[in-house]
Image (cartoon, coloured by chain):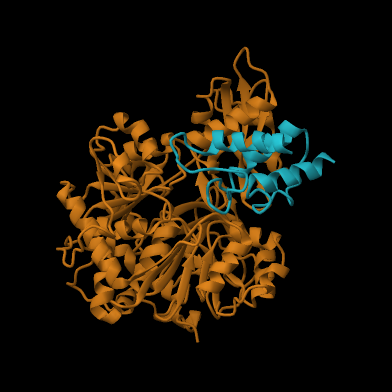
Chain colours: A orange, B cyan
Amino acid sequence: MSNIGSYEQRLKDFDWSIAKKVLDWKEGELLNIGAICSDRVCARGGADRTAMIWEGFGGKKKTFTFDDIRVYSNGFAQMLESLGIKPGDRVCVFMDKIPALYISFLGVLKMGGIVQPLFSAFGDESLEVRLAGAGTTAILTTQKHVKKVRAIQDKLPNLKHVVVVEGDQGKLREGEHFYDFETAPRVEAFNVYKSDSETPSVLHYTSGTTGQPKGAQHVHGSVMGQALTSQWVLDLREDDIYWCTADPGWVTGTSYGIIGPWSLGVTQCVLDSGFTSARWYQFVQDNKVTVWYSAPTAIRSLMRDGDEIVKTFDLSRLRHLASVGEPLNSEAVIWSEKVFGLPFHDTFWQTETGAMMITNYPGMKIKPGSMGKPFPGITATVLDLKTHRPVTEPGVVGLIAFRPGWPSMFREYWERPDLYRSKFPGAPSNATPAELRANQDLWYVSGDRASIDKDGYYWFVGRDDDVINTGGHLVGPFEVESALIEHEAIAEAAAVGKPDAVNMEVVKAFVTLNPGFEPSDDLELSIMNFIRKRLSPLAMPQEIEYLEKLPKTRSGKILRRYLRALEWGEDTGDLSTLEED
Amino acid sequence: MAEMKDVILQYVIGEYVDEDDEQDVGYDTPLISSGLVDSFSMVSLKVFLEKKYSIKLPDDEATPEAFDTVTSICRLVKKHQG
């Protein structure tokens, strides 16, 4: 029997107070994610239970109990306080998937800081935009990545502290701090910051069509949604060995790679090395993984390597599989059922929602290719593309939207109330974020399109904007274009998503060249590597097309949608009409 | 073969390894499985090989395993040089 039991019954009986029961949390108790994921697990008898099994490249392996996590996160919290960092300050964690990332994440929360996780493959420009946007006070990083921080530090007046948590202390520069949590004195007790359900916790940056990335601000109360969905959708139980393959630089890696499992006291595994199918299967086998939460890109890569390799590993402990990041194609669901004897359960949610929203549940019939049904307690619909009224007819495509107010909903875009308001069509122009969230006449619009079938299952269609979803990561075209035109050869640029069998979409750039430059193989490679280093490998165009001029509206706006439609073989519409836009 | 190995090795070091990184990268150093080169960056490495050696590497052969060391990359390139 699964944790959720009957989905239909849960719909009837649902109340968010169930989440409090799941956590055994009572009104008046401290609500701090850092403490809930460590101190509280220990206080409830889980101190000696394994919290994390970590493997790195080259056979490196470490194991931490919940008591280790408690003490070491205390150490991070105390260290940050000693630097003068105050509650509410933004503290960035910028490192690979090493143990210090997971533990420092909790440490920042314990001292009341707002933790800002950033993907370690970001180049210095991507890093700068996000640190400047958040006015970040401190960054925790490693010797491997501190070079990127040094390159931009002069442009970040708010960034007062650089803490290196792994590497050679002798290589630090003046003003930088070194903190190795394993050799630092153990901190048995720490006075955890008295946060409540509305205290800011995590600030995740996410990309949009226009402008630079924006920070989705979450709160400590989000743990209610993350814990309950972990229990009902991922079906996590105390004796599970759970593997979430996501990087905590992105929201899945924090909501379900840290907060969800650890708030429930569940053991999780982390693999910090490059992808190969054999390595992943070996990891599942060696650690006796029971619940596996991964992404369609990875699943399709595993599929590509065939069925035979699966038979060479003992994966018999697996009992539940789930997927997130982009729509999971029906072939992948059918394939996983064939080779693992278990289907991957697709889940849909986004950085802003903080927790799963529309998913497939253990025990509920899966329609391969469908996103599933709304989580109990979530009121979802699709809105007509023009009127923004709920679509009532099955199979008609509209905008996925949710009634606001669920516990893990983002509370604002960092210092962008206008942008927050724009996510609620028809909202009063002077409404505050709190008023918007409380208004049950409004819908929060996700930016994705779907249809609902006659049985209530949702079917993903695509994004409603120009954001590129590559391997489950959102890349903003504006950010790529801004970086492209910094290349000496490029005059103008447009970035769009083009279809890709494994990653769903990859970035393609259309460029015009400055006088004196001609298209060449060397130039193509130079542009690719320029973006890879400035932004990230994800943002690197995998194809570059040279044009004499870019298609534009009469007002000079580049017609990205026209270029995208060409790539996807879709109807481009009447270009002359588009030019009038 | 030796010359090809050196050309590819130098490209990998120049593009993917930081100047002050003390990591010793040789012909058989794992690139993909170690995380030194990620799967997205493999594309620029593939483009380099295709341009440099005037070949076309099919996507189903440009796997993380085939790109995992300079030695295995050379084998793949040689195969497609005919």
Q: The C terminus of chain A lies in which quarter of the figure?
A: top right
Residue furthest out toward the front: B2
Asked where in the image residue A105 lies, by quadrant, the reply is: bottom left
Which percent across, then down, holds residue A392?
Answer: 56, 63
Report if residue A87 is visible in the image: no
Name the residue located 74 percent from the left edge and 50 percent from the top edge: B61
> Taking A85 as reference, is A68 above or below it?
below
Along the horizontal axis of the image, is A161 left or right of A402? left
Which percent across, then down, holds residue A302?
Answer: 65, 62
Residue furthest out toward the top: A516
> Taking A549 as reference, is A208 above or below it?
below
Which percent across, then down, holds residue A118?
Answer: 39, 47
Name the residue located 16 percent from the left edge and 66 percent from the top edge: A189
> Taking A346 as reference, is A150 above or below it?
above
Residue furthest out toward the bottom: A1
Number of disc labels: 0
Along the horizontal axis of the image, is B32 left or right of A355? right
Asked where in the image residue A320 lies, by quadrant, the reply is: bottom right
Name the residue located 25 percent from the left edge and 32 percent from the top edge: A157
Which percent across, then down, holds residue A141?
Answer: 34, 46
Name the residue located 65 percent from the left edge and 35 percent from the top edge: B6
Report if residue A441 is visible in the image: yes
Q: Nearer the viewer, residue B80 or A517?
A: B80
Along the horizontal axis of the image, is A459 left or right of A23? right
